[in-house]
Image (cartoon, rainbow, N blue to C red):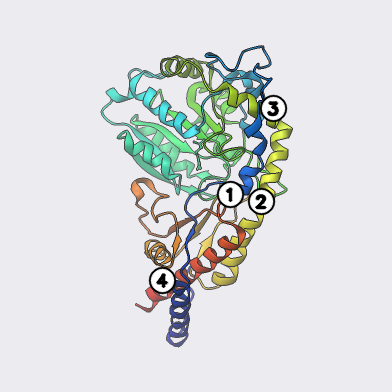
Amino acid sequence: MTTELSPDSLTGLLERARQDYQDLAGRGLSLDLTRGKPAPEQLDLSAELLSLPGGGRHTSADGTDVRNYGGLQGLVELREIFADVLQVPAEQLLALGNSSLELMHDCLVHALLSVVPGAESRWVDQERIAFLCPTPGYDRHFALCQRFGIDMIPVPMTPEGPDMDAVERLVAEDPAVKGIWCVPKYSNPDGVSYSDETVARLASMQAAAPDFRIFWDNAYAAHHLTDEPVEIADLLAACADAGNADRVFVFGSTSKITAAGAGVAFFGSSPANLKWLLANNAKRSIGPDKINQLRHVMFLRDADGVRAHMERQRALLQPKFEAVARILEAELGGTGLARWTDPKGGYFVTLEVPDGCAKEVVRRAADAGIVLTPAGATHPYGDDPRDATIRIAPSYPSLAELEQAMHGLTVCVRLVGYEQRAR
Ligand code: PMP
């Protein structure tokens, strides 16, 4: 990323960056680019949900009274809508609570405390448990591992998904490796979608642990930002074809489709894994919120309804992602101080600054009133060994606020980057 500069021009650039930073700090900004939350206008797109299912309607397609207990698998008509989106046949898909993260948490707890199909013992009875963590990745996946004492082994991301040579080696040689976190489409935070080859290798690789599981967190399955939606290969089918039917847990939710934290979460897997989860779930719940599921069916109608709704989401999000790219290019292009991703979907842009600068950029931005996700959050244990990765979440602020925040961020990158070069 380095571009050679003469001492004179470096002094000039540093002086300008210092002046710009002083101006920035003097503006008393209060802006937040931390979490990938939908903006209020995005939530407004689903305003109708608040008045559904309506007074007169309380039965599902098969006549179930959604106001009552039961129906552990969730409404079949909702599972049919999302079968297509999540690449899981409706009969292998469960519609459950309001959060997929909660489901991932529960799957870990259940695997620790009750034997998963194919395992000889519970995970909690094993001396050591480890998960592969494609990095950069989602901080809440890493937080779950920390919470349950699961060792994290970082694996570098490539433009095609995790480095599969490393994944295959680690999974084949170490029976303590019980799982891998994957966000296969428009991944959080680098926007990568897994190639067909990556999916095929994940499905067919040798695993030392008989109970190895891929946590396939397809959180951004329908969240396109261009006219050319990315389609990924069907991992569940590929695993079954490769004789590893029980290898994958598929997760998804409508959190960033309808209402964040008030949508519906899904779990898809093999018949044996479904039976295992349903048996465990039966102990913790007498049934999911089927009223919410019914209102989602009435609102979204079918898979085409989801696609049309996501086009409306895109119309709000795309200008924000374009603004991020435009400002980064205008302010940092050609400086050799930064590289960034150009995601085709999802919720994040990853900004890479010179090694040793990310924490300082985030600190300077915070001092100027611009809050960013803590540097390091994209890495296991919060430790980015190069201190170079910054996650940008453009969705929540208004376009005007986002533009201000991005300008401010580029000032901080220039300041910290040129200060480092001048040392
Ligand atoms: N997985 C990923 C990759 C995410 O980015 C998010 C939200 N930031 C979630 C899961 C959380 O989803 P939910 O609201 O369904 O718990």
**Amino acid carrying mark 3 in the image:** Met
The mark closer to the camera, 2 or 3, is: 3
Farthest residue to the front: give it: 55
Is the C-beta separation of discs 2 and 1 under 8 Å? yes
**Amino acid carrying mark 2 in the image:** Leu
Identify the residue position indicated by label 2 in the image. 316
Q: How far is the residue under mark 1 from the one under mark 4?
A: 30 Å
Q: Which of 22 and 214 is in front in this view?
A: 22
Q: Which of 327 and 383 is in front in this view?
A: 327
Q: How far is the residue under mark 3 from the one under mark 1?
A: 23 Å
Q: How far is the residue under mark 3 from the one under mark 4?
A: 52 Å
Identify the residue position indicated by label 3 in the image. 298
- Could you say which disc has been placed on residue 416 in the image? 4
Secondary structure of the residue carrying tag 4 is helix
Identify the residue position indicated by label 1 in the image. 39
| Upstream in sequence: badge 3 or badge 1 | 1
Q: How crowded is mark 2: few (under 14 residues within 10 Å), some or many (20 or more)?
A: some
Q: How crowded is mark 4: few (under 14 residues within 10 Å), some or many (20 or more)?
A: many
